[in-house]
Amino acid sequence: MSEIVYLNGEFMPLEDARIPVLDRGFIFGDGVYEVIPVYSRHPFRLPEHLARFSRSHDAIGLDYPMTDAEWTRLVRDLITRNGSEDQSIYLQVTRGVAKRDHAFPKGVKPTVFGMSSPLTTPTRDAIEHGVATVSALDYRWQKCDVKSTSLLANCMLRQVAADAGATEVVMFRDGFLTEGSSSNVFIVQRGTILAPPKNNLVLPGITYDVVLELAQTNGLTHQVRPITENEVRTADEIWVTSSTKEVLAVATLDAKPVGNGKPGAAFRRMHQLYQDFKRTVMRQAA
Ligand code: PMP
């Protein structure tokens, strides 16, 4: 069955969706996006994803083209039309089609796009054995809190990992941990879960918030503070989190084992709490 996508007010098969080459998303990467996981046909943390989407629009001076109620209806329509139980909903808005000129055009309608793909969550092997990572200098811009479609630096950084046969990069800026190319990074140090603070240098992950909430509600010792590169390199555990990776343990950083090179006790606890939490939320939504 062909995937059904939404483009500027209409649903259509993916292969029929077309945008003009002067779309500023194509020309400048001038747009913002969201990725929302769907479990058993229920979008996970949708209000939080929409709140971040709206903030991304504000940050780049783009009008939020639909209300949250309209986005919610669109997400539900995409879920229904695409049918599978677990999906990944992708929403993107660009500044629209205009003569190529850097400054923002006036009176242009934004391009609104939505699609669904099958959700691919981590394999059992990745969960049980952890994943490989490599370190990289975070050379992205100073607005990493904006979920912008200008992802060239993130793609280049992910390629560094891919070339090394690794799953993700762990990035440092000025000697401090920032995040991965498409995930947030936590460490565990002598039983304490540590997370870098949310600021302009990291994307405020929805999964990051869930992990910290689970730590809070379950009385797990945790702290949000700047984390040095040395702390990461000597951590007992490193985790990467995102809507599609959920919570994953890092087995190696630059080919050196993290802790004993196996997912640690704190990871196993958090992974279980995350799976239980997902199930509870989905049961409540059903
Ligand atoms: N950081 C970056 C750079 C990302 O692209 C993502 C994935 N959207 C994340 C962190 C994790 O965010 P979330 O938990 O909302 O998927």
Image: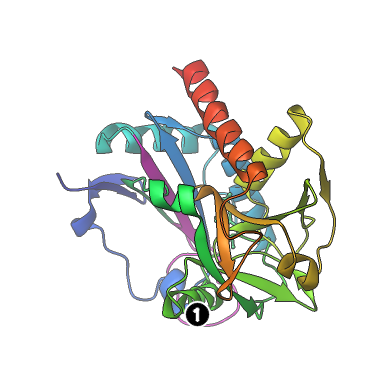
Q: Quadrant of the N terminus?
A: top left
Q: Residue at x 57, y 35 (%)?
A: 274
Pick the residue in front: 32 or 131.
131
Where's residue 230, x and y in %? 79, 72
Where's residue 285, x and y in %? 49, 19
Q: Residue at x 84, y 62 (%)?
A: 226
Relative to residue 109, is residue 21 drawn left or right?
left
Residue segment shown in magenta: 86-111
Count of picture labels: 1
> Which quadrant of the structure image shows residue 145?
bottom right
Pick the residue in front: 158 or 73.
158
Q: Quadrant of ligand 1?
A: bottom right
Where's residue 39, x and y in %? 41, 33
Using the image, determine if residue 68 lies above or below residue 91. Answer: above
Q: Residue at x 47, y 82 (%)?
A: 100
User: Label 1: few (<14), some or many (≥20) within 10 Å?
Assistant: some
Main SS, magenta residues? loop
Using the image, determine if residue 50 lies above or below residue 184. Answer: above
Q: Magenta segment: does it hold 104?
A: yes
Which residue is outermost to the left? 1
Secondary structure beneath dot 1 equals helix
Colour basis? rainbow
Using the image, determine if residue 53 lies above or below residue 250. Answer: above
Residue pointed to by mark 1: 160
Q: Type of residue at label 1?
A: Val
Where's residue 64, x and y in %? 58, 49
Q: Magenta segment: does it hold 267?
A: no
Pick the residue in front: 129 or 205.
129
- Does the rendering let one see residue 85? yes
- Does the rendering let one see residue 123? no
